[in-house]
Amino acid sequence: MAFVPYDRPVRTAFIGLGRIYDLNVRAYVNNPDVEVVALVDPSEERRVQREADWPQAATFASVAELAASGIDVDAVEALLPIPLHTEGVIELLGYGWHVNLQKPICNDLLDAQRMLDAATASGLVLRVMENYLFYEPLRRLKSVFESGELGTIAGYHMKMVGSGAGGWDVPWSSFEWQIEQMKRGRGILVFDDGWHKLSTALWLFGPVSEVRAWIGTTSFGHGIDLDAPTMIAWQHANGVRGVWDITLAPDLYLRSDYYTNDERWEVTGSKGFARVNRCTGRGVQQPSLEVYVDGEMRGYHALDDDWASSFRDSGRHWLRWLRTGEGPLMWSGDEDVDVLRFALAAYASSGSGGIGVSPAQVI
Ligand SMILES: NC(=O)c1ccc[n+]([C@@H]2O[C@H](COP(=O)([O-])OP(=O)(O)OC[C@H]3O[C@@H](n4cnc5c(N)ncnc54)[C@H](O)[C@@H]3O)[C@@H](O)[C@H]2O)c1
């Protein structure tokens, strides 16, 4: 069934009003493409907190209550805990609503297929948002090396340091479902936050043909097992190799308005390099993007390097897409399954002593 763009503001509901709502909501504020008609969360505290943002919207404790209310909804912003993604998305599509889902799509390929099948059967769109693809320093990094000024790409490195000090508060209820994820072997660093790094790799350099990984564990007791130290390396189908290291520094104070995650991306070419110095946190206080070529360093001081802006722009892209049907979804459900395959290849490799695994072969 071909998608027909809306010739009026899209009627939307937020499903899940937790921590990340604070950033996803930025796409909806003062946006003529959208009308927020409903808010859903079983937590009364969350509903009361968020209804102040949308006085015209109705609030509900469950999706079923919204569906029974008779309120017309075109699309939903699904901000559910990961363990609820599969059944939650199938339910939302079942009510006839397009879905913009937070990453990761889900934990395994069987569930992903069920979600894609539900979207196909209903003729609705399942998008899995990837805000990092909208982070301006990363977009500029991509355009710098695609311009050819670094020469032929020789390889690249991503770095992530998880720290426990600084940043915004994360409610314990969010950790509870993360612990559930950890028990299923889907850790918070590699699978949850790491999803973004795998996504950027695919977005920057295309399909991955082989992955080699060494995923460690650091236990803090009470079921809190963090998946670091970790090293993952891979080769893209175009021959470019990437490597990503994850280090845990629990007592390192990191200044951040959001999560305490210190991140870097560095692309090396035959003539120079380009490096994004930070993203979620405010670790390296240099220009957010630096480019070195021919003995000269160029610093980008005026990029919109507030991580929250990537949520705003990702969401605006989705809402514009619903109004026009134009351009890539960034990501479609199928594209997000490629990210899942990448992650599953890393787990398969690590579990087999670091051998090379093709994402196309994982089951
Ligand atoms: N893009 C990013 O960088 C980023 C960052 C953080 C979280 N996330 C993703 O966002 C999603 C939500 O994470 P969070 O940190 O906001 O979690 P959270 O635990 O803070 O919030 C989840 C909310 O969903 C509500 N909820 C639970 N069951 C529900 C149901 N059946 N119907 C409606 N609401 C329900 C909970 O009451 C809670 O308010 C996850 O998929 C997570 O991976 C993405």
Image: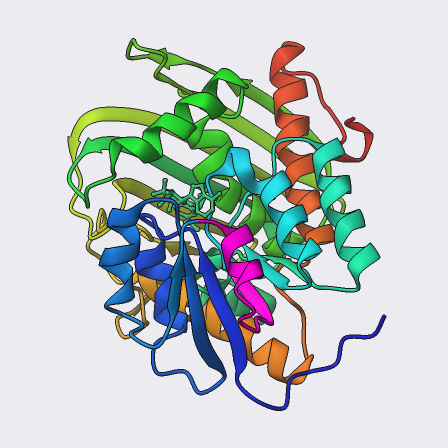
Q: Position of residue 195 (x, y in %)?
A: 52, 41
Residue in the picture at 36% in, 12% down: 223
Quadrant in which the N terminus is drawn: bottom right
Where residue 350 sits, quadrant-wise, is: top right
Q: Is residue 97 above or below residue 190?
A: below
Q: Is residue 291 visible?
A: no
Q: Which residues are magenta?
A: 62-76
Q: Is residue 346 above or below residue 283?
A: above
- Examine the structure image and report whether residue 267 is included in the region drawn in magenta: no
Where residue 213 sits, quadrant-wise, is: top right
Q: Position of residue 297 (x, y in %)?
A: 33, 64
In the picture provided, is 64 more to the left or to the right than 300?
A: right
Q: How is the image coloured?
A: rainbow
Between 302 and 144, which is closer to the camera in this rendering? 302
Q: Position of residue 12 (x, y in %)?
A: 50, 70
Residue in the picture at 63% in, 9% down: 353
The image quadrant where one finds ligand 1 is top left
Quadrant in which the C terminus is drawn: top right
- Examine the structure image and report whether residue 65 is included in the region drawn in magenta: yes
Q: Is residue 54 above or below residue 117?
A: below
